[in-house]
Amino acid sequence: MHKKVLLAGLYSTPILIGSHPKGLIGSVTRTFDVVIAGAGVNGLACGAVLARAGMTVCVLERAPWVGGGAVTREVTLPGFKHDLYGSSHVWIHCNPDFTEIKRELAAHGLEYVPSEDQITGHPDSGGGPGIVIYRSIDKTVASIARYSENDARRYRRIYDDFNLVRDGFLKAFFSPPVPPSLTAQAMERSREGLRRLREFSLSARAWVEQNFSHDFVRAVMLNWALAPQILPEQEGAGQSFYIMIPAIHVFGQSIPRGGSQQLPLAMSRYIEARRGAVLTGSPVSAFLIEGGEARGVQLADGQQIRAARAVVSALDPRQTFRRLIGPEHLSEDFLELVDAYSFGRISICRAHLALKEPPRFTNGPEMSACAFHRIVDSTPQLIKQYAEIAQGIPPSDPFLWSACWTLMDETRAPHGGHTLIVDTFVSNWLADGRTWEELKESYTREVLLPKLRQYAPNIGAETILGCYVDARESLEAANPSFVDGTTNGGERVQAQLGYFRPFPGYAHYRSPVRGLYMTGPHCHPGAGISAAGTIAAKVILEDLARERRRV
Ligand SMILES: Cc1cc2nc3c(=O)[nH]c(=O)nc-3n(C[C@H](O)[C@H](O)[C@H](O)COP(=O)(O)OP(=O)(O)OC[C@H]3O[C@@H](n4cnc5c(N)ncnc54)[C@H](O)[C@@H]3O)c2cc1C
């Protein structure tokens, strides 16, 4: 209690409140303790932690709305609310530093609707029952056992294994990363640790082949593991199986009632209720650097928002360091690291449908009861798709991801109506010179929807009321942080993970400019609606506490 009062007293800078979310009024320069560029979930999570610690925070957003990768819009027909980007909320429930704030967000309008039973459906093109991932591990194991008893036993062992290492994993996930040698040294001391280290170093494809025997089970697990946009043959991906797959049974999946954007909206109200401001329609055109220290931002209309304590960029590193900071403030060596950062070559082609009825899967009512499906036929299909992606060829027989969130939250469509997301991963370039903007509609009509109909034949002209499609160009136009139409903030290759993310020597959320911090999917732990901006906030609070001790 005493500490909180002390912090509030120390950090509060007199400010003019009454900010209007539509932008700044007049040309008054204002000062906050912390200024954050980018009102996506990470920028806002960082702001919420700092506001809770007593600081005045200003978050600036170029778009007319907050949310970035968590935005809900009526892009087909009035009343049909489509989550355009991030929609499945899993990781935010694992973030120990967001638990309290998440609870407090209820008072600001956030309500999570959990998947009570079925979480993900994996229909079987061969006419079998398919695999359903339930919240219950027992029911999930029984579902896998219909294909292979051995694979079902193996799945349970992975889940049990996760429970042994869960706390350590989650702490590492939501903390600044440690040097790779520390992890290796800690693990290489025991036979068990060495076994894990070896498994972690496998590629996702090698891992599923070593652990499962039935091809459909392998395909389901591989497709799941590739969701954060790793490549099937990419070594060092083995560890994702030990987190992603079992975590769903422990933390479940839930979606905000009313749409994904309800999360950033509630976070904005939270910050504003603590004497902060969240200003939309306010593009940052430069970070202000004076005497080698970050002092605030300049907006496109020339106004300045100044920071007494710290500035945070929640924008992609190319924009932050190549466009918004003059090269005179950065070393050549550092700019080389920025230029070498790889966003990858995978994008998405995603259709949003307004429907008269939900998809009805031929694999039975349990499958149709799932809101969320990963649709994959076999491992050869997956391998072929990634080969086509590598060559810039539109996937000819793609796996699909589909989500009918209205099955869980009826407020997202007019009475009786439904929304559906159908997408697949594609290359962000085309070898024949066309653009995805030219191709996306016909690709949806001729490839994505016919593929979906193989499993859910009722999705056709009679049930589709409206359709909106996003692909590389429209993604990037909507949010510059989707650089080149990529969706995960930068490739998840070994050279860009953990201690190397975003750049070697800068994995601690501090940029080379004093007082300028970084958050976003290009920082550890990477993309996802995880509110990982909490980590940068903790680093800022630690730095400020250290400074105070020095004074
Ligand atoms: C198609 C797609 C599907 C996804 N699905 C899922 C999912 O189901 N589950 C999941 O967990 N994750 C998913 N993700 C990933 C997740 O949505 C993102 O990783 C996450 O939202 C990133 O949050 P962020 O706050 O770091 O960045 P962003 O949300 O990108 O926020 C950055 C913000 O900065 C703003 N901005 C940019 N430039 C400026 C400027 N100059 N001045 C001011 N503001 C600026 C942008 O408009 C944006 O609002 C998906 C992503 C995509 C693209």
Image: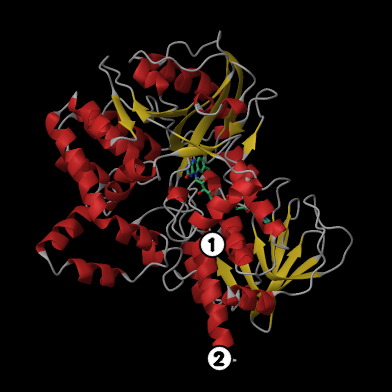
Marks 1 and 2, how far apart at CA: 26 Å
Can the viewer see residue 321 in this picture?
A: yes
- Badge 1 crowding class, 10 Å Cα cut-off, few under 14, some 14 to 19, many 20 or more, is many
Tell me which residue sits at (36%, 13%) in the image: 362
Q: Which amino acid does the dot numbered 1 rest on?
A: Thr
Where's residue 495, x and y in %? 36, 61
The front one of 108 and 500 is 108
Mark 2 — residue? 550
Q: Is residue 284 above or below residue 504?
A: above
Question: Could you say which quadrant of the image residue 33 lies in?
Answer: bottom right
Q: Is residue 383 above or below residue 228?
A: above
Tell me which residue sits at (74%, 75%) in the image: 13
Where's residue 361, x and y in %? 39, 16
Residue 453: mark: none
Q: Residue furthest bottom?
A: 551
Mark 1 — residue? 519
Q: Which amino acid does the dot numbered 2 rest on?
A: Arg
Q: How many marks?
A: 2
Q: Is residue 234 left or right of residue 452?
A: left
Tell me which residue sits at (52%, 57%) in the image: 100
- Does ligand 1 reach within 8 Å of label 1's beta carbon? yes
Q: Residue furthest front?
A: 1
Q: Residue furthest top?
A: 462
